[in-house]
Image (cartoon, helix red, strand yellow):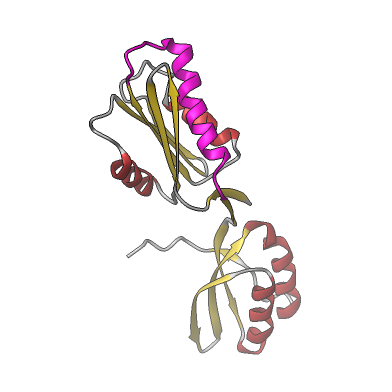
Amino acid sequence: MSETLLQPVRFDLEVKKSLFRCQAAAVESPEQALAFLHSVQNHDATHNCWAYRIGQQYRFSDDGEPGGTAGRPILAAIDGQGLDGVMAVVTRWFGGTKLGAGGLVRAYSGAAAECLRTAARRTVIVRENYQLRCKFEHLGSIHLALQHAGALKAGEQFDADGAILQFALPAAELVALQAQVRDISRGHTEVRSAPTADPA
């Protein structure tokens, strides 16, 4: 389990007359992250630097600031807060005083970290997609086992031999569910990984 943001948040930080505004939101895909960037970036500002973390996927941009002084510190702030599924955009309006590389790193990471630190959070339960085939006589018991394991039903098909169930399950519950399903079906049913359906 990990945590993400409950709702979009904003935080302003002023450093030597430069304004650093961090805006962040929960995202589930790189496309959502970039859509958030386009919705909040300010084209009148000096820079719109950003980073996102979605599981093992991450990206960041310095947007014209010296390399390594903006995007990576924003990503480090996301990771430092233990968050996942988050996009953070820090927009800078230049105030006339150069901050130097160290000053930029502190300003960008500080704006992002403070924004995320004070944000309301929610728990993310990561589920993987699985499927199983079972006989009709075991269907009721298996439905109950899936419910107790926190599975979300994704589909159900029937044929002459029984049912094919598709569901999403917290990965931590897989071993216990496997054992239950084997007991119910006397070893005839196995939980298998299912391909993720492409969104329509």
The residue sitting at 23% across, 33% down in the picture is: 43
Q: What range of the chain is rendered magenta?
A: 94-120
Please name the predominant secondary structure of the magenta segment in the image: helix
For the C terminus, the quadrant is bottom left
Residue 114: % across, % down: 54, 33
Does the magenta run of residues contain 103?
Answer: yes
Extreme residue in the left direction:
44
Q: Residue at x 50, y 26 (%)?
A: 109
Q: Is residue 95 above or below residue 129?
A: above
Q: Position of residue 27 (x, y in %)?
A: 44, 49
Q: Is residue 108 magenta?
A: yes
Q: Which quadrant holds residue 197?
A: bottom left
Q: Position of residue 82 (x, y in %)?
A: 60, 39
Depth order, front residue of 197/170 = 170
Toward the viewer: 143 or 100?
100
Comparing 12 with 157, the one in front is: 12
**Of 120 and 166, the residue lying toward us:** 120
Q: How many numbered callouts?
A: 0
For the point 42% across and 10% down, the residue is 100
x then y, percent, for residue 93: 32, 25
**136 over 107 or under it: above or below:** below
